[in-house]
Structure formats: C-alpha cells, structure tokens
C-alpha cells in the first residue's frame, strides 16, 4: 500500500517543474497545478523572452536530474561584466580568474519547457494548466482551485502540498492571514523599481554588442544591464528609483524625457535601441522586493519552496539557482530519511529541510542586496576595482587556493550561501582595508599577498566570533 | 481660520496619551479614541499591575511636557541587575559606574493615568473610551469606530490621523492589506514566549527580596526576571521556549512539572512564590515579536507612531522610552516647520520625521534582540563579566570620558539609538577581543586601558567604514 505518497505541487514554474521531475524520478504520485496556460503551447513574442543567470548551483540540480547537457545547449556563457561608462567606453571585468568559471544567460521559457517535458515523461507525474489556486487549507491538506477551462472551482485532497507558487504564494498568504501559529514574515522593497527593454538583433541577425558578457551601465544611483538571448537580441533592464533623483520612474512620463535621459546617461545603449520609446511605455515598471519567512512548513502537511519561501532581488543572479538548490537540498533530506509513510515522517523531513536550508536562503537574500550597491556604484569605485584586479590575479595564479566572494557564491556549489557570505565578506573587508592602508598591492609578491589576506581574514572571523561570544 | 488643525489619535496608551498632551499644549484640536475602558475608573487587581523600565529617554519626554517631578514620584530606582545563580547566590551588577545613572521600575497604569489626566486638562483635547477602531481610510483621512456604549458604528472625519494603537495597529494592517503603495513590513517572533508571575509583598508589607534592582535568574536558554512595584510586590516574568529544551511552555502543563522546573532552576524564587501555580495557570503565555515597517505615513493624511510603527522585544527596557522619544522627535520636527496649514505641509513633516527617526527605532529593535542573548546567557559568561567589571571601573574613574553600550543606549538621551548601537558594538568588540588576548585587564593602568579601548574602537569603526565603501 502506498501511504503518504501523493504530492500536490502548486505552481509549474522553474522550481515546481524541477521538483515534479525529481519527485517523479523518486516514484511519488505527483500532481502539479499551474495557473497560467502551458507555456509550450502559447507563442512567446520574439525578443521578449525573459532571460536569467544560470550558474553552478543551478547546474548541480540539472546534474541530479540528468539534464546537464540538454540545459547546456540553452546557455550563452557570460565571462564577465562589460562595464559601459558615460562616454561609451567599455571594459570587461571577468567574474573569475579561472577560465572555466563563468555564468550563463538562459531563457526562462526555454528552460521551463524542458523541465515540463522531462517531468511529464514520468507516468506518475500529472501537470494541469489553467488551474489557479485560490486558497490552501493547511490543516486538512486540501487546496481550492479555479479551473479557467471549465470555469468552476474544485478541491484537491492530497497527502502533502508543496507550494512553489512564487513571491506572491497563496500558501504563504494563508499562513500569514490565518494566524494559527506564530509566523515570522518580512517583505522589503527597495526604493528602486525595474523595467524591461530590449536590444533587437542587427538586420544580419547578429548581436549588436559583445555577446559573451553581462553588460552594465553603472551610474551610482541607477543602472542599466543587458543579457544576451539565443536569437541575437539582448534583454535590457533599467533599475531606477521611483521617486528620487533628476530622472525617476515617476517623472519619466514623456518620450522626450526618456530620450533625454538615455542620451545623457546611456548614449551608446540608446544607439542600439531604436525601439526604446515603444518598449518603455509598453512594458510595466515592477517593484524589487525581498521576502523571508518562517516556518516554511505546517506540521507534515504543507511546505513552501523556492520564491514562495524566499524571494530575492536579482542582483546576484542567484534567484533561480537558489530555487534549484532548494530541490537538491530537499532531495538530500529525502535521501537521508526512510521513505515517509506517516504525517510525522513528513514533518521530520520538513523540519530538517528548513533547519538546514533557511540560513543559506537568508544569506543569499542579503548578498543580493549587497550586490545591488556593488553593481550600480562600486564597480566604478577605485578601491573596489583594485580589489577585483587583485582577486583576478590571485584566482589565476592560485586557482586551488583562492576564491573571491563572487566565486564562493557563484562557482562553489559545495559550500552553502551562508558560509560563502561570512568568508566572502571577511575577505572583502581584509582586502579593502589592506589596500586602503597600502599594505598590499598588485605589484607585490602575490604569494605574500595571498598569505596576508588569508591571515587577516581569519583574524576578522575570529574577532567577530569573540565579539559574538560564540 | 484653523486649517489642518484637527488631529485624531487612535489609542490612548502611553504613546497616544503623551502625544495628545503635547499636541494639546501646542494648541491643536485633538480627539483621542481608545478601545479599552478608562483605566482610571476600572479597578486594577493588586499585585497584577504591569511595570516597565523607565529611563533617561523617557524622562526627556516628561521634561518636555513638564511632568518630570510627578513621574518621579511613581518611580522605583533599580541600580543594577541582581543576578541569581542556581544555588540561590546573588551578586549585583550595576548598570553604570556613575552613581546618578540608574533605571526605574514604573507602573504602566499609574503613568498612563497621569498622562490622561494631564492631557484632559486642555480643553482642546477630548478623550473617548470604549471606541474600537475597525478600519482607517487613509485616502479620505477618515476612521471607522465601534462604540461599545451605544453599540453602533460611527465615522470620524478629520485632517490628520496618528495611529498609536500598538503592535497590532489597525492603520498598519490597512497599509499592508490594501496594497495601494509599496509597504515594507516585517514581523519576527522569537522562539521564546513569556508569562507574567508575581512575588507578593511579605505580610509586613515589605519587599521579599532586594527592592532596588532588576532581578535576573539567567539560565542560558531561558530566564526569569523580576521588577519591583510600589506596593511591595514584584512582577516576575518567565521567558522560555515554546518547544525546545527539557522544560518549555508546551510541556509545562501540570502543577507538578511547573513546581519541579522551578525547584530545579529557580529554587530561591520558588521560595518567594507560594502563588506560583495559580499565577502560572491563570496568566496567558504571550509571544515576543519585533515589528518594523516603512513608510510610516501615507501622504499628509496618516502616520504610525510608537509600537504601531516599531514594536520591539522588552530586553533593553526601551519600549516605552522609544515611544516617548518618538513624541519628542515629532515635536522637534513640528517646531522646525511652520505651523502646517495644508496636507502638503503635513506630508513634509511626516517625511522629515520618518527620515530622522526610523534609523533609530530600527537600531533599538536590533539592540533589544542582542540583549535577549546577553540577559539570559552572557551575564554568566566569564569574558562578559570581566568586560562589565572593567567598564564599571572606567565609568567610575572617567565619568566624562567613558560610556558603555548600555550607558550610551540608556543614559545618553542626546545621541540617537543608531549612533549608540554602532559605537557601543564596536566598543564591546574591542574590549572582548583585547580581554581575550590578554592585552588589557582590570589590574592595568586604567588610563592606558581607556586609551587602548578608544583607539581600537576607532579602528574597528574605520575598518567597517572602508569595507562598506562609504
């Protein structure tokens, strides 16, 4: 008899479809309900597909489900940041001193379609589209859905519900509103919003600017970025304050002011964007928020995963990677427990998962905020650039012995985000202070510089430890 | 013509009644609506009055409204922490090395009654009780109330609404639920709850234990504290985990287990509490939460103040003091602006108030969490006790030149909480690390120790600054 083997997943986005695939591989009876239509059957207009940064933590999940090579075919490597100054000068700042470490631009839709295809290959996995979740009864482990096709409500009664329904999660909302237990919750908005724009392919079909980089136009209090798509276009995103500064989302209300703003701040980008005005006024302005909460689960009945549990701002390119890593971590916990056959087994699994995982998703949320300031501003800062140059040299010369904070977070999938954050921040502090005081520089003996950095980093960690009385 | 001079205050607790008094003194037309009955007319059962810590920031507000001496008469000075170990041994750890610095225990009810009396002396101030706020329309600046006396609803239409309705604020809830603007919000619960108990006066009417201290029974993962009342009793609070440990709120369900727990952990307290079991099972277990949010205001219409804007855990004894300081800060902003006559004037005042104040209320929220760990655990730690002894000596010998973090927060009302936090944390880190490495001790030349601490503190602040690229 199969007991407690029926799992309902709410949301067939990136996290939900990967989870369905993995639980399908493990033999569970999986039903997935998705409110949107099947994205494999709905035409996505050319050049408007949203792309994402895909890196080692995400790839670890693809290896787990056996999709590494199929996903690789969807990837465009980005070796570094291409910084554009106001005069249109550019310079490339690599993400790592190791040639084999880079991040990728990938289409959300393409990747999602692949995961859905693979999940549906399992006969124990069923995916239904146009089914919008209206509420979850986490005491009874049932969920109420509205079926857009039949235009009627229905209730799903199952053993376990996992909500991967994103930043606006219905399950999380019911945890908050029903007040049946103490639910810690935060939503934090930046004062900036974002708007998607595009650089279309040249008439030849070629990329209009360098393909293998993440382009950044950092301007201190705002910035523009661009990531390549497979079709020769770039998806461009403007990050700008709603209210502050001479130009902001609230006062950019005419074609003239938008053109004036781009001419002044991003003249080289403007040259590549004859479609700017159309994009600007057609596309929405969206907020940038961080969501944290706890507990993620209610008894052994329901669990939040992915953005539903921890939505983050996009500046570390880790949103999708973190959600994929959730599935890897959850799979590890499942592996470590006997196959659950009671509610209490599931409760132990959920508890164990949250206690292992939450410290890391909290850390990447904070790191992503850090990187907002780094990308829009610090990349222009003299000391910061010296630090990056030094770190590139160290990674190149001591590939086994040095990893920058960026590398620890992005390319070191075998350590958690929290460990990467603590070590990376201490290392940054050590380097910046030693550079500021002239104790190290790029012309010193690099072996000596590495030793100084390591010893100073250890001292910083130890002093923090003593101060925390741990 | 009086324009924009009608102010509705929701909630006549400590913050609301002080605000009403101050705005009354300034000549505004103030209406206060309070959901509870008038606490001056409802008997409060002996020994059950809740007391609070009152210190210099709160007193600054009392000076502002001319009530310093009247409030002083309600105060019981507490010069330090009286630490009780498991064997019933006690030692006193002073709050400051300066004799004139101490905190006070004060009755919430007594202080609230005084503020209500004083506010009502102004004919431009009206206070109505038994009026429960049901919702606020922050676009129209109206509020819907339920009148418990007439058992009917009514709407108040006013120029400005200030909600001082505590941690469960109705105005804050409407900001959150209506989603008319980006509202950052967090509620964070500790894994511990609290329960109020009591030590009744001796038959003679005397205090059963030392009167002029805040008593603490620190036990690492939980603690008991006691504050004196004017009637000879102490209000005792047990802080304990809901779930974890051998004894917790979820498993202390029988008189036997509660007695066993107290006999084992707090034997000297148990001897003073023949009423323990009655108190324990009569009184509720309450959660410990921190609330932060932003923005506090909506245009020039509505404003959150006090716990409604920033609820904190009680471990720094600063909850009431922070709310009183809100009124002082708001009064400063009012003073600095011309008397508001338009909505836009109020909007400027509210913006200016939040931008000055929020950094400080965020800081005291974080400091209060720090002190939870300090009180229940660190006060027993060897290094921590050495630090406190050294700080007492420094404050005694260099009263004008040294102030501990506790003193900066509690007795230095002329610097903000954030400044106190940054300096205090750096100072703690400097002392703990130098003590751990044997660079300073209580037997060294204190003048030299002070210099070392100051120089190390400055270095820590500077290094943090460089690492933050500020």
Image (cartoon, coloured by chain):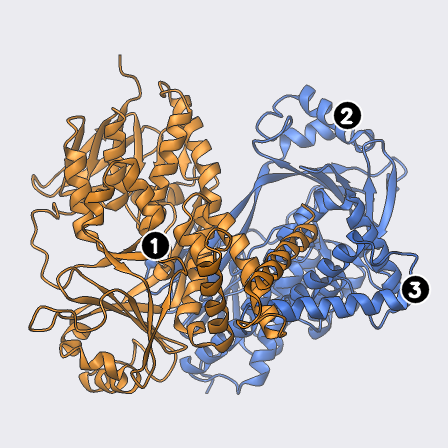
Chain colours: A orange, B blue
Spatial CA distance of label 3 from label 2 is: 44 Å
**Is A178 positioned to the left or the right of B364 in the image?**
left
Q: Nearer the viewer, mark 3 or mark 2?
A: 3
Report which quarter residue A368 is drawn in: bottom left
- Quarter holding the N terminus of chain A? top left
- Nearer the observer, A374 or A385: A385
**Is B44 positioned to the left or the right of A396 in the image?**
right
Spatial CA distance of label 3 from label 1 is: 57 Å
Residue A449's disc number: none
Measured as percent of width and height from the top left, residue A433 is found at 60, 69
Report which quarter residue B466 is drawn in: bottom right
Q: Residues within 10 Å of mark 3 (few under 14, many from 20)?
A: few
Chain identifier of the residue bearing label 2 in the image: B
Q: Residues within 10 Å of mark 1 (few under 14, many from 20)?
A: few
Mark 2, residue position:
B263
Q: Nearer the viewer, mark 3 or mark 1?
A: 1
Measured as percent of width and height from the top left, residue B124 is found at 56, 74
Q: Are marks 3 and 2 in contact (CB under 8 Å)?
A: no
Mark 3, residue position:
B445
- Which is more N-terminal, label 2 or label 3? 2
Q: Residues within 10 Å of mark 2 (few under 14, many from 20)?
A: some
Chain identifier of the residue bearing label 3 in the image: B
- Quarter holding the C terminus of chain A? top right
Image point 52% across, 58% down: which residue? B308
**Is A435 positioned to the left or the right of A162 in the image?**
right
Could one spot residue A421 in this view of the protein?
yes
Residue A100's disc number: 1
Q: Are marks 1 and 2 in contact (CB under 8 Å)?
A: no
Image point 62% across, 61% down: which residue? A452
**Is A221 positioned to the left or the right of B391 in the image?**
left
């Amino acid at each position: 008899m199969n007991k407690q083997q029926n799992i309902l997943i709410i949301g067939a986005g990136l996290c939900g479809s990967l989870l369905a695939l993995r639980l399908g591989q493990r033999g569970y009876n999986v039903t997935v309900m998705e409110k949107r239509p099947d994205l494999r059957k709905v035409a996505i207009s050319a050049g408007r597909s949203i792309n994402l940064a895909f890196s080692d933590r995400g790839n670890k999940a693809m290896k787990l489900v056996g999709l590494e090579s199929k996903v690789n075919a969807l990837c465009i490597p980005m070796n570094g940041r291409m910084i554009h100054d106001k005069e249109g000068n550019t310079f490339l700042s690599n993400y790592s001193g190791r040639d084999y470490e880079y991040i990728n631009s990938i289409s959300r839709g393409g990747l999602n379609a692949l995961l859905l295809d693979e999940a549906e290959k399992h006969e124990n996995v069923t995916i239904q589209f146009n089914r919008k979740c209206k509420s979850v009864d986490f005491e009874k482990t049932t969920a109420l859905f509205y079926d857009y096709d039949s235009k009627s409500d229905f209730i799903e009664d199952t053993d376990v519900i996992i909500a991967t329904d994103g930043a606006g999660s219905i399950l999380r909302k019911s945890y908050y509103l029903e007040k049946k237990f103490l639910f810690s919750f935060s939503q934090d908005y930046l004062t900036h919003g974002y708007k998607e724009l595009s650089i279309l392919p040249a008439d030849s079909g070629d990329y209009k600017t360098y393909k293998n980089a993440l382009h950044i136009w950092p301007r201190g209090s705002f910035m523009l970025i661009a990531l390549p798509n497979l079709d020769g276009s770039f998806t461009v995103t403007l990050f700008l304050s709603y209210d502050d500064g001479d130009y902001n989302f609230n006062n950019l209300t005419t074609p003239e002011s938008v053109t004036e703003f781009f001419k002044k701040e991003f003249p080289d980008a403007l040259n590549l964007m004859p479609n700017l005005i159309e994009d600007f006024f057609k596309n929405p302005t969206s907020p940038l928020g961080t969501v944290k909460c706890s507990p993620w689960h209610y008894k052994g009945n329901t669990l939040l995963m992915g953005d539903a549990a921890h939505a983050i701002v996009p500046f570390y390119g880790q949103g999708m990677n973190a959600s994929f890593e959730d599935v890897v971590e959850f799979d590890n916990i499942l592996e470590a427990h006997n196959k659950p056959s009671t509610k209490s087994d599931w409760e132990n699994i959920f508890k164990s998962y949250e206690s292992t995982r939450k410290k890391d998703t909290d850390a990447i949320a904070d790191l992503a905020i850090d990187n907002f300031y780094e990308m829009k501003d610090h990349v222009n800062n003299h000391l910061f650039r010296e630090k990056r140059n030094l770190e590139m040299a160290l990674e190149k010369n001591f590939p086994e012995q040095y990893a920058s904070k960026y590398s620890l977070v992005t390319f070191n999938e075998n350590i958690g985000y929290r460990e990467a954050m603590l070590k990376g921040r201490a290392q940054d502090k050590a380097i910046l202070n030693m550079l500021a005081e002239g104790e190290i520089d790029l012309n010193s003996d690099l072996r000596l510089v590495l030793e100084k950095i390591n010893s100073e980093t250890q001292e910083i960690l130890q002093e923090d430890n003593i101060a925390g009385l741990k």
